[in-house]
Amino acid sequence: MTHKDVNELIDCHSQPLTDEDLEEMTRSASEEEEEEELEETHEEIEEPGLTLSQEHDDNMVVQELQYDGNDLICVNVAPVKAHIFLGTTSGKLVINKFPLHRAEKFSSYLAHSGSVVKALVTYDEGRILTCGGDGVVVVWKIMSLEEETPEFLTAKERLEDLPQILEMLVSRADLQSKREYTGELESRVSYLARDKEVHLGLQQQEFAASKDALVARYNQILDQMNDTIQTLEKERETLQQSHETKIAKVLEDHNSVIAEHQQELRQKLLYEYSKQDKLESILKEMQTTLDRQVEEAERRTREELQQRLDEQVALVNQLTADLEKTTSELERERSEGAEIVRLVEAATEVELGQVREALHSQLAEEHTNVIKLRSEKAALTKNYAT
């Protein structure tokens, strides 16, 4: 577990102290005595409660520091900021100066409801983490050294000389188990990679073989299709030639049949003509009577039509004269009265059309009468023949 993971765990399961509470770690003993409201969580020991002794063992100086509580369980040091942190079974975090010959009064802070299992200082010595038997991780802030203090330059040099490593809240057994598990995973991954490479090689071989087989198969199919296309082309040419021969033969037969039918039709027409001549000779006598009647009817019709035509012609002449009379005036007033001229011409054309329609209707009536007389003539001829 890295320092980042610990911070995330702390943010979810604990509430860190405020800056005011953390600054109390470096306050003097006189200031701590005046804060009576923090007596439950911050216990200031009036007496140093320590016994400092030095012994020389093989040119090495051993320093001892006696804490009156006799319930210490863990320890950690911040060498740059010159503090030593002690954890007790009563759940308190005890702080003093470091090295031990600079020790002063102990400052204790209630951190956990159970014993403090471990205390860990971060790399930059800006935070200290305590892990308690109550299952809570608490983060404490360590105040920075002021630049005016004589320890600042020394602390800065010491901090730069520290190795660049990350803190881990794990034991050696955990690291060993993780290393073994990682080794197993690496061996498993390498085995899977080799197996995958072999499998991919086999797949590539199978793919190459199947590709060659498919290419050969499709080439064979293409050759067969080309042969089929050539055969169909030859059959098409043969069928086209036979079709043209059959069409020529059918046309010849058709022309001969048409000639025979035309000959038969000519014979029938000659027979019908001879029969018609006979009928005309039989009906010749009746024709004179009907001709007289028709001539009389035509004469009367012509007289009536001539009379009407004369009237219409006179009207047209009058309109034409009026039109010619007003032509000069219309030409002078063409720019102003072009629409009037068009209307007059249109009216004249309409009247002429009406006259033509009347004449055509009269001619159609006379034609109907003639057809009626001819039908009567035919009926009389039929009666005469029977």
Image (cartoon, rainbow, N blue to C red):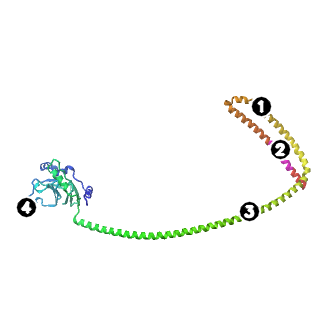
Depth check, front residue: 249 or 364: 249
- Depth check, front residue: 41 or 326: 326
The image's mark for residue 366 is: 2
Q: Quadrant of residue 235?
A: bottom right
Q: Are marks 2 and 3 in contact (CB under 8 Å)?
A: no
CB within 8 Å, label 4 to label 2: no
Marked residue nearer the N-terminal end (1 or 4): 4
Circle 3: is it few (<14), some (14-19), or many (20+) Cα within 10 Å?
few
Q: Is residue 140 magenta?
A: no
Q: Give the main secondary structure, helix, strand or loop, of the magenta stretch.
A: helix
Left or right relative to 371: residue 15 = left
Of helix, strand and loop, which one carries label 4?
strand
Give SS at disc 3: helix
Q: Are marks 1 and 3 in contact (CB under 8 Å)?
A: no
Q: Is residue 113 visible?
A: no
Q: Is residue 325 left or right of residue 203?
A: right
Q: Residue at 23% x, 66% y: name it.
A: 173
Q: Which mark is residue 55?
A: 4
Disc 4 versus disc 2: nearer the observer? 4
Q: Nearer the viewer, mark 2 or mark 3?
A: 3
Q: Position of residue 12 (x, y in %)?
A: 27, 56
Query: Marks 2 and 1: CB-CB under 8 Å?
Result: no
According to the picture, the residue beneath numbered tag 1 turns out to be 321
Residue pictured at 89% horizontal, 46% vertical: 291
* Residue type at tag 1: Ala
